[in-house]
Image: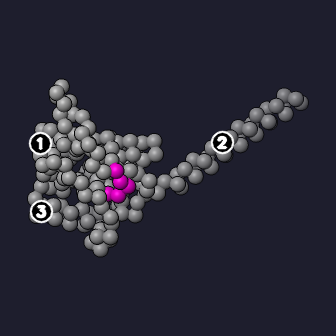
Amino acid sequence: MMKRIAIFMIATVCVCVFITGCGKDEESKQAVKVHDYYKISDDGEEDIAALFYLGTEKKEIKKTAEELLNTYNIPLEKALDIEYEEVKTDNGREWYLIVPKYEGTTIQVHSVRLNDQGSLEEDKELTTTDKPVILCCNESDIVPSAQVTVTFKDRKAVFNPSISLKDGKVTENEGVFTK
């Protein structure tokens, strides 16, 4: 009889822990809210931001921006209502759009430079924001001039926006949608 009571108590505790754990998981899922302007449905669950190359010249940038609005079905009026942070590194010529996926995401941009050992190191902070960022960087195709850190809760993506010399597309970065 005592054995049955002990087994019953252990089973009850396990069920309570399981139910309580499920509730917390559900609460944490509900607390994660995707920004209204983030319309990318084919990104990965692990992605916390999106990165788009806009171009180097005004005509190209305008055309690319219009294509993005059409692709993701965002009316121009809505796009104009979104607050952006514009950031430029010294002598940058490539324009990128970085869009945070979730509310509570921060984007930090630093300029970077080559040190005497030939490695990139952070130079100065250019911005920290929770808004989408329009970034002008990279004077050269070889050496990036910016480092972006996107942070959401315990997830972080750190990358140098650039175009692949192999295929001319945005270099892929873990945790960042780039298609």
- Mark 2 or mark 3, which has the lower sequence index? 2
Residue numbers of the magenta segment: 128-132
> For the residues marked 2 and 3, what is the alpha-carbon distance in whole angstroms?
56 Å
In the picture provided, is 129 more to the left or to the right than 120?
Answer: right
| Mark 2 touches mark 1? (CB < 8 Å) | no
Give the residue at x 42% y 54%.
102
Residue lying furthest right: 1
- Crowding at dot 1, Cα within 10 Å, few <14 / some 14-19 / many 20+, comes out as few
Question: Mark 2 belongs to which amino acid?
Answer: Phe
Question: Mark 3 belongs to which amino acid?
Answer: Lys
To which residue does mark 2 refer?
Answer: 18
In the picture provided, is 56 more to the left or to the right than 37?
Answer: left
Q: Nearer the viewer, residue 164 or 59?
A: 59
- Crowding at dot 3, Cα within 10 Å, few <14 / some 14-19 / many 20+, comes out as few
In the picture provided, is 70 more to the left or to the right than 29?
Answer: left
Q: Quadrant of residue 145?
A: top left
Q: How is the image coloured?
A: one colour
SS at badge 1:
loop
Give the residue at x 12% y 62%.
58
Residue lying furthest top: 117
To which residue does mark 1 refer?
Answer: 141
Number of numbered labels in the structure image: 3
- Mark 1 or mark 3, which has the lower sequence index? 3
SS at badge 3:
helix
How far across and how far down the image is residue 120, in percent?
21, 34
Q: Nearer the viewer, mark 2 or mark 1?
A: 1
To which residue does mark 3 refer?
Answer: 58
Give the residue at x 60% y 48%.
24
